[in-house]
Amino acid sequence: MPRQVGENLAQLARVTSDLATATSVEALTKIVTHHMADAVGATIAALALTEDDHVRIIGVRGLDAPEAAQWEIIPMDRRTTVTDVVRSGQRLVLVGADAISSRYPDLVNAVRGERSTVTVPLRVAGRTRGAIHLSIPGPGGPHPAELEFLDILADTCAQAFERIEASAVAAKQTARLAFLAEASIALAKSLDLDATIRRVAQLAVPDFADWCAIDVVRDGKLRRLAVAHVDPAKVELAMSLQERWPPDPKSRYGAMEVVRTGTPLLFPVITDAMLEAAAQDEEHLKVSRELNLRSALAVPLLVRGRVMGVITWVSTDESRRYDEDDLRFAEHLARRSASALDNAELYSQTLAVAEQLQRAVLPHSLVGTPYWDVSCWYEPSGRTEVGGDFYDGFALDDGRFVAFVGDVMGRGVQAAAAMAQVRAAVLAFASVDPRPEAVVAKLDGMIQRYGTEQLVTLAYVLADPEAGVAHLANAGHLPPCILRADGSVEQLPFADGPPLGLAPDGRRGAAVPMGPGDMMVVVTDGLVERRDEDLDAGLGRLCAALRGVEGWPLGQALQHVVDALRDVRYDDDVAALALRRTG
């Protein structure tokens, strides 16, 4: 065996070790096009893989960029050394320029002087998945021992591809399962519809899409509610597509087709011809091209048998082309997203009803009398649920004034509904007999008879200017505070019984002197209670906030108290009512 052949075989043996330890397609490509080529003295080397009806050259060495680009995609029906070897599964050796040009006359321009070519198939598990092509300059061909070694290397290379792809698939599936688990947790965190839609769009970017759009069906039309993009500067551009050029309702290739059929759409490759066909005008085509669309898929948001919207993933990277596997994965995410969006939508609708109910029953302002100034203040919490705080006040014909503040424990529609019922009952009972003992007794009887799942507290005041007294009944509510005209502050005794419906022995009530200029303030617990302190500390802060506001306009004084006590970190509604006897 010639010495050069022996050296070549030694180098080829080292290549075998490199192939066995390669961990990526890029590393494998470099080993073939450089190490293997160098081992046999090839000046041109190419690694090709089969894809459907064509062969793709994934790595090439020895050709300039323009020529290499010509050979990137080779249709299987075109005769070349690579396609012939892929079809036959057999090694092909051509020795000399004449042999090459005779068999492949169309490739004569690729022959660079006297040389030989060796093309070996990548075979594994009974199938050919590609080929290695080597062009070796000089007379004569490779030694038979080298050819046998190249066959072994080609098999090793094919096995390495299988191993790397299997590892990549396993890692991909693991990442997707982890992603779906994380997505489920993220989607369950919020019942706010807008926040949930934005989160759905953000979840896929950038790991699975370069940009993601969420369109929902509203009145038979698609409205784009969210877009996430790897380039924040292009979010507005992507949003404008739907606004400026609404999709054709009759189109068979867009999101409206997904809505009509409930069937996903897959576009593995987006060509410029497809953009031209979909564009509604030249500006539309220009914007579409600027988004650099390369591949896309659209899946329906299905829930309870209806399509509530569409998720669209778009790739702007040539190396990421969506396939059926990606489509199935997107459908998994869409199912979770649709459920989360449906829950958020139902919750938003329920919340809207509750908020309308709450606004309908709470007065915007209270009207005083020549004997009594009255002011109120209300602020819902920062949460997405409505609460049960309520208040009201009205003058009686004889100059007395009725005012009350209450709190239904709990949140949501049930609390709002219970609040509306109790407030209406207080107004009804007070219009017949406004005495605190009578009103609260009737409320106790009503709740005991008809029941309620929520606890209800109430502070009820009947202010009598002629007697200079405020009669008070307190059913489990916070005690009011009084700011006297001389600037002193007095905290009234705590409640004379438990919440409404829980006092079988009746209520005692109390009478509190109210001279000219005296101001009584009644609040709900959201203003004074804190998780890290007891109630006495909160009431102490209320009394402290009252000091120094005597003589102020009543509304200004109440606002000062609220501003001094309100803690935005404490997530609860706040209601406050101030009643002051005039001079």
Image (cartoon, rainbow, N blue to C red):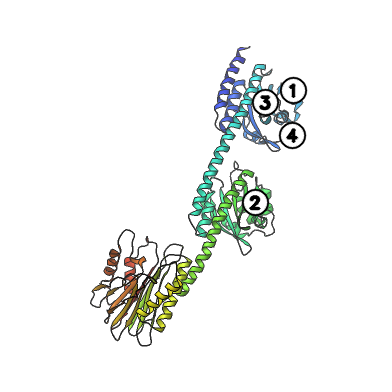
Residue appearing at x 61%, y 55% in the figure: 302
Quadrant of the image containing the N terminus: top right
Report the mark closest to the observer, 1 or 3.
3
Q: Which residue is drawn at 65% across and 23% down?
A: 151
Q: Could you say whether the residue bearing mark 3 is in a helix, strand or loop?
A: strand
The CA span between labels 3 and 4 is: 18 Å
Q: Which of the two discs, 2 and 1, labels the residue nearer the N terminus?
A: 1
Observer-side mark, 4 or 1, equals 4
For discs 2 and 1, the disc positioned in front in the rendered view: 2
User: Mark 4 belongs to which amino acid?
Assistant: Arg
Does the CB distance between marks 4 and 1 fall below 8 Å?
no
Q: Of callouts 2 and 4, which one flags the residue occurring earlier in the amino acid sequence?
A: 4
Spatial CA distance of label 2 from label 4 is 34 Å
3D distance between C-alphas at marks 2 and 3: 40 Å
> Quick one: label 3 or label 4, which is nearer the N terminus?
4
Residue type pointed to by label 3 = Val
Question: In what quadrant of the picture does the C terminus appear?
Answer: bottom left
Q: How far apart are marks 2 and 1 (CA)?
A: 51 Å
Label 4 Cα neighbours within 10 Å, binned few <14 / some 14-19 / many ≥20: few
Tell me residue 287's x, y (percent): 60, 54
The mark that comes first in sequence, 4 or 1, is 4
Residue under numbered circle 3: 120
User: Dots 2 and 1: beta carbons under 8 Å?
Assistant: no
Q: Name the residue under label 2.
A: 264
Residue 78 is marked as 4
In primary-sequence order, the first of circles 1 and 3 is 1
475 or 147: nearer the viewer: 475
Tell whether 394 sits left or right of 90.
left
